[in-house]
Amino acid sequence: MMFLIELATLIAFYVFTYVLYEKIYPLKKINIFFRILFIIAAALIMAYIKTFKINILNFSFSFLSVILFNVIFFKPTSKSFLIYDAIIFVIMLIVEMITAFIIALIINVPVERITDKPYSFAATALMNWIIMLALAKVFVNINSEKGMNNVRTQEVIMFVGLIIGEIILFNFLTDIISESKNRYEVVIILLIFLLLDLYLTYLINRMSKAYKTEKKLELLTQQSTLQLNAYNKLNEKYIASRKVIHDVRKHLASLEGLITANKADEAGKYRDMLNYELNKLMPRFECDNSILTVVINNKLEAADNMKVDFRVNAEFTEINFISNLDITAIFSNLLDNAFEACAELPEEKRHVTLSIARRNYFVFIYVENTFAEVNQDVKKVFRSTKKGHQGIGLSNIKSACEKYNGNFNAHTENDMFITEILIPIPETSDSKDMLQKVHTNI
């Protein structure tokens, strides 16, 4: 009888965990029968392990099974899911201990005798889940915007280590607490731990949102700089165009004089000079997306200054479903990385090519560049070779792609570094129309 109650409690534990995670993480498409089978199997193993009555073994298996449960059935968007799992597990552990003390106090029996009788064990489990359901609502509300996705690696390690330390502390205190006669004091201490864990969740969430805001400000600064440069260039061209317009009658008179004097060669050279000056007044790249036009023209200017052979092939630019900030994040950082990668090569070997095309219902962005050196860590993540550069550009590109359910891939092929991005076009986007013709003068 007690084993069946224990098994039912553990099944409820995994079902509760599943429902809670469903509010936090994207769900994988896995057969419902496999989910049920996993829950029953995990509950049976856990029930068997509990018969040994070794607390550290119980805690370890429970915690690891929760992490495994998350990885198999859900798609955590970052490594910070370990913080969620650890905090949820600790909260469940504290609530279980608090309800055991409350029931023991109500029926006036020692805490260690709670599991001796089915009714007291069942009453403890029922109260435990009532409290957990209330706390789950609080936990989900705190993390409603999934802010933990921006927590940095070192902070994940620190917070997970802190929570694991709390679990180990509870393991050593379990026997002492169960034998304590000062039940009110113990419950108060446990409640303090519970409040601290909830506050820790809130604190991490706020910290993560601060990092997210910092990233956004970085992109805004980057975009503002690009636009300011574009407006300065536009102003320079405006001043130059006024000079050309002011002298247009003189130019026409000079051309007419050369033609009248049968100096065709000189007239042709003069015409070519005028065309060259007029072409400088025209933007080298134009499309219907204003921020993309600004970014590409800015990078064409940068390529000239860095002596980089930069070529653009833009067959499709109807990307208005992507925000201006994310367009800046993707294209500006992609091209900055490409220019930096080939900057150490001789001028004749500095080549960068950007292609933007449509592949069925996807926008395909392709960049290839020559490179002198790239660093690659153990996870095959390419990073800048510049000292003090932490790969923030790639991080911004990946974040922007993930926001639109896109895929990002970077690899080397022969002597070229290749970056590929594939972003699905929303069904409501105007991008479903025929391919747009883009006028370029590159």
Image (tube, rainbow, N blue to C red):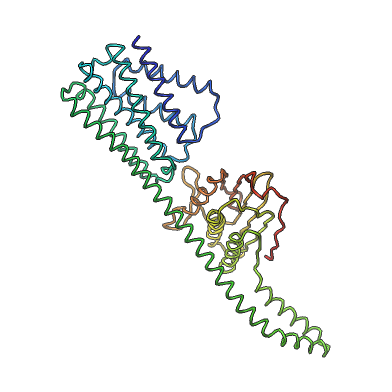
Farthest left residue in view: 181
Q: Which residue is drawn at 24% across and 31% down?
A: 190
Single out the residue that lies furthest toward the top.
1
Q: Where is residue 309 in the image (x, y as percent from the top left)?
A: 62, 63
Asked where in the image residue 148 lies, by quadrant, the reply is: top left
Picture layout, residue 379 above or below residue 41 = below
Near-viewer residue (122 or 193): 122
Residue 240, picture quadrant? bottom right
Position in image of residue 208 (x %, y %): 39, 47
Picture mark count: 0
- From the image, which quarter does the N terminus lie in? top left
Q: Nearer the viewer, residue 7 or 270?
A: 7
Q: Which residue is drawn at 32% across and 31% down?
A: 91
Please indicate whether residue 33 sits to the left or right of residue 245 in the image. Answer: left
Image quadrant in which the C terminus is located: bottom right
Where is residue 14? Give x, y as percent: 42, 24
The x and y percentages for residue 139 are 38, 36
Q: Judge whether 68 appears above or below 354 on screen.
A: above
Is residue 277 depicted above or below 337 in this figure? below
Q: Is residue 13 left or right of residue 196?
A: right
Residue 13, by quadrant, is top left
| 44 sits left or right of 199 in the view | right
Q: Who is closer to the viewer here, 186 or 176?
A: 186
Q: From the viewer's perspective, tell me whether residue 411 is left or right of residue 285.
A: left
